[in-house]
Image (tube, rainbow, N blue to C red):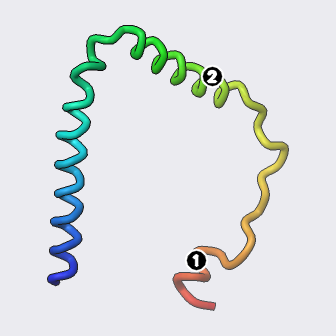
Amino acid sequence: MVLNTGVWLSDITCIIVAYYGASELMHPISNNIIFKLIAGGAFLFFGWSYFLRKPSEEPKPLGGVGVLIFWFGR
């Protein structure tokens, strides 16, 4: 129980530090139109490249043990 509490406190601390750290970094960027255009262009590029790529010819079967066999035994 002590280990679980420590994990929870660690996760909450990391989230709080990341939130306040990111909010401090975003103040100068929020008014920068060049940064917004570059970020938007990057999102559009990656989105369109994912949308336009060719699908694989045939799905490959997974090797190894199936999930149901793993959980319920053989």
Residue 13 in the image: state x and y as whole percent.
17, 57
Q: Is residue 40 left or right of residue 9?
A: right
Q: Which residue is at a point 84% across and 43% down the rendered structure image?
A: 57
Q: Secondary structure at mark 1?
A: helix
Q: Which residue is at a point 74% across and 71% down the rendered structure image?
A: 63
Q: Nearer the viewer, residue 60 or 41?
A: 41
Residue 51 in the image: state x and y as whole percent.
65, 27
Location of the C terminus by quadrant is bottom right
Q: Image quarter for residue 32? A: top left
Vertical placement of residue 57 versus 67, above or below: above
Cα–Cα span, label 1 and label 2: 37 Å
Mark 1 vs mark 2, foreground winner is 2
Q: Is residue 64 left or right of residue 4?
A: right
Q: Which mark is residue 21?
A: none
Which amino acid type corresponds to the residue marked 1 in the rendered image?
Leu
Q: Image quarter for residue 4? A: bottom left
Q: Nearer the viewer, residue 4 or 52?
A: 4
Q: Secondary structure at mark 2?
A: helix
Q: Which residue is mark 1?
A: 68
Which amino acid type corresponds to the residue marked 2 in the rendered image?
Trp
Residue 31 in the image: state x and y as whole percent.
27, 11
Location of the N terminus by quadrant is bottom left
Dot 1 surroundings within 10 Å: few (below 14), some, or many (20 or more)? Answer: few
Counting residues from the start of the chain, the first of labels 1 and 2 encountered is: 2
Q: Which residue is at a point 17% across and 40% down the rendered structure image?
A: 20
Q: Is residue 7 left or right of residue 42?
A: left
Q: Which residue is mark 2?
A: 48
Residue 50 in the image: state x and y as whole percent.
65, 31
Tag count in the figure?
2
Vertical placement of residue 18 versus 43, above or below: below
Identify the residue at the far bottom of this view. 74
Q: Nearer the viewer, residue 68 or 21?
A: 21
